[in-house]
Amino acid sequence: MKVLVCVKRVPAPGAKINITADGQAVDTAYLAFTTSPHEECAVEEAVQLVEQHGGESTVLTLGPAEADEQLRYAASIGVNKAVLLPIDSAEWDPQRTAAAITSAIQGIESADGPFDLILFGNESADAGNFQVGVRVAYALARPIVNGIKGIEINGDSITARRHSDAGVEVYAMPMPAGLGVKEGINLPRYPTLKGRLGSKKIEVGQVVPQGVLGGQQMVSLVQSAEQASATVMLGNGPEAAPAVVDLLEELGILK
């Protein structure tokens, strides 16, 4: 089977985010970047599906030239091909992003045949728009379900599971199809030394992204107020015990 997984380069979780002076972008001067956690699981799922059923996997991203790092990381854990849709400007809106990815997929499929399954992260870790995967699947006239935490391949169809307040929902869909994968569907592997060395040799294809501005436009970014915290020394050794007891009673832990 042929599996495509779409990923996004995002600031590493837990990093301190600063905004540029004009309020139009994230200041990336001291930021580390990674793949969105949901999408990291989608990459692992793509590799596992190919290991189980044969075929090949492809990773695709729209982003700056530096996103080559995320593509090669996916290759280091077993993805076979990589495609970059390079952009120099600020982050594209969801509608434009989806149009560019759709166009790229159509071009790849016209040359190499259709993908059986296209995997997306449930949402990106930065913008969290929940739109791109649904827009792409709709444009390609393929079924899609988000929030997926289990995938089974049954011949030409897929059984996908997701958790809800009512329990577990099970979906059966014909391929080709799309799925929005949620973190927790698997435990992503770490790349081996062999995988890292091999990822340096993979040829990253490039497709010029095609897409016009959508209706959703950013006005400005606002830095959230920092909540200052202070450390209070309660004492040293046994002498601190009364103060600890008083604090626990104040917090309602001891009554």
Image: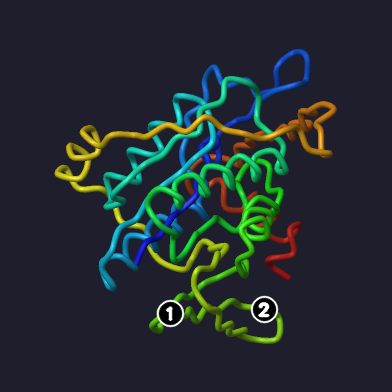
Residue indicated by mark 1: 156
Quarter of the figure with the C terminus: bottom right
Q: Where is residue 83 in the image (x, y as percent from the top left)?
A: 41, 39
Residue indicated by mark 2: 164
* For residue 132, side relative to residue 178 (left or right): right
Count the labels in the image. 2
Q: Which mark lies nearer to you, 2 or 1?
A: 1
Q: Position of residue 121 (x, y in %)?
A: 55, 55
Q: Residue at left 49%, top 52%?
A: 39
Q: Residue at left 69%, top 67%?
A: 254
Q: Is residue 234 depicted above or below 164 in this figure?
A: above
Q: Residue at left 68%, top 60%?
A: 138
Q: Position of residue 15 (x, y in %)?
A: 55, 34
Q: Which of 215 and 70 is in front in this view?
A: 215
Q: Is residue 34 depicted above or below 79 in this figure?
A: above
Q: Which amino acid does label 2 sit on?
A: Ser
Q: In which quarter of the image is residue 45?
A: bottom left
Question: Distance of mark 2 from mark 1, alpha carbons?
Answer: 26 Å
